[in-house]
Image: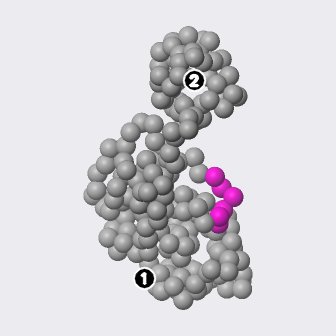
Amino acid sequence: MSFSINQISNNKCEFLETKKFTKRNQWYQLNKLIEQGLVTKLKRGVYAIVSDKMTDQRIEVSKVVPSGVFCMFSMWQYYNLTTNNPSEFHIALRNKEKIKIPYYLPIKLYYWSEKYYNLGIIEIQKEGHTIKIYDLEKSICDAVRFRNKVGMDIAIEVVKNYVKRKDRDFDKLAKYARQLRIENVMQNIIMPML
């Protein structure tokens, strides 16, 4: 695979895969393109050409995974609950649902039972497309529920930032915590912050 700055600026290729590089100078060219802002990194080994036609990647992810719901780190960043910037989109699916993900989209899938999957789904509109996400309180419950996987420090940061918000709803949070069977753990984390 060979490419030049002219090809990039004329948009003759959309994605660059480093595994297809055959010459040493291609790495140099890639770094130059990144410095010039013509290329952006999608995930390890995959780069996209920056153009005016680029859409929000969340729209593309929701098209590829239509039944998927943005969750975990993607939602904590969306609600400004964490300083952690995820390198991939975190998507929840129903158990036993299979999906083929294109190589260029950085997606991490979670398979949840109907009970956990359906709780707290809302839809937002982005550039005329519908995107499924979890509401604020369900996102907080996910942080507490998966505290051992994501790290206690991240779970506490997410909860602490939630407590500071004006639009928080403790009744809804308690209801979700009860349904997800994390009520006692949630109280133990939130009580010292109040």
- Residue at numbered disc 1: 179
Task: Identify the residue position indicated by label 2 in the image.
Answer: 9
Q: Residue at x 44, y 78 (%)?
A: 180
Q: Residues within 10 Å of mark 2 (few under 14, many from 20)?
A: some
The part of the chain drawn in magenta is 80-85
Q: Residues within 10 Å of mark 1 (few under 14, many from 20)?
A: few
- SS under mark 1: helix
Q: Position of residue 141 (x, y in %)?
A: 52, 74
Q: Nearer the viewer, residue 147 or 25?
A: 25
Which of discs 1 and 2 lies nearer the camera? The answer is: 2
The label on residue 76 is none
The relative height of residue 127 versus residue 114 in the rendered view (above or below) is above
Residue at the (43%, 67%) spot, across then down: 123
Residue 86 visible in rendering: yes
- Given the image, on which type of amino acid does mark 1 rest? Gln
Residue 184 seen: no
> In the rendered structure, which amino acid carries the disc numbered 2?
Ser
